[in-house]
Amino acid sequence: MPIDPENCEFFDPDEVPTVTNLIDDLNSSISTGVNSQGEGEEDRMGYNLTRLAPHVAFFRESFLLPLLKDVRLSVQKKKAKEASSMDF
């Protein structure tokens, strides 16, 4: 479970989703006719129908996207360095 370090004092381990909660959420979405069939890959993921969705979104926004930006920047810098150091 991702924890926001700026608000860690408010984290309550008893309030995190359990597997049973997630199964209940998925079963509830099935019984009400809600499905996860959408356009993008994210829409096809079942977690977006559960109480896990905000936690996944937080993890994506606070960790994965900044990591992706850093990797892309690193690759761009490496390519620029290789291009500028070519000897003929």
Image (cartoon, rainbow, N blue to C red):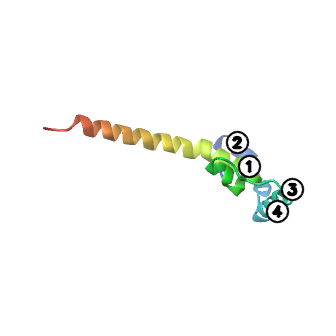
In the image, residue 36 lies at what x, y percent?
Answer: 73, 53
- Say if mark 1 contacts mark 3, CB within 8 Å: no
Say what amino acid the circle numbered 3 marks. Thr
The front one of 30 and 10 is 30
Using the numbered discs, state the Cα–Cα distance from disc 1 to disc 3 in whole angstroms.
31 Å
The residue at the point 56 percent across, 46 percent down is 64
Residue 3 visible, this orientation? no
The residue at the point 67 percent across, 54 percent down is 44
In screen coordinates, is 45 left or right of 84? right
In the image, residue 82 lies at what x, y percent?
Answer: 26, 40
Using the numbered discs, state the Cα–Cα distance from disc 3 to disc 4 in whole angstroms.
9 Å
In screen coordinates, is 42 left or right of 16? left
- Say if mark 4 contacts mark 1, CB within 8 Å: no
Find numbered disc 4 in the image and state the secondary structure of the residue it sits on.
Answer: helix
- Residue bearing mark 1: 11
- Residue bearing mark 2: 7
Q: Tag 1: Cα neighbours inside 10 Å, few (<14), some, or many (≥20)? A: few
- Say if mark 1 contacts mark 2, CB within 8 Å: yes
Res. 61 image quadrant? top right
Going from N to C along the chain, the mark reached first, 1 or 3, is 1
Using the numbered discs, state the Cα–Cα distance from disc 1 to disc 2 in whole angstroms.
7 Å
Find numbered disc 2 in the image and state the secondary structure of the residue it sits on.
Answer: helix
Mark 4 or 1: the one toward you: 4
- Residue bearing mark 4: 27
Say the numbered circle drawn on residue 32. 3
Mark 3 or 4: the one toward you: 3
Say what amino acid the circle numbered 2 marks. Asn
Res. 83 image quadrant? top left
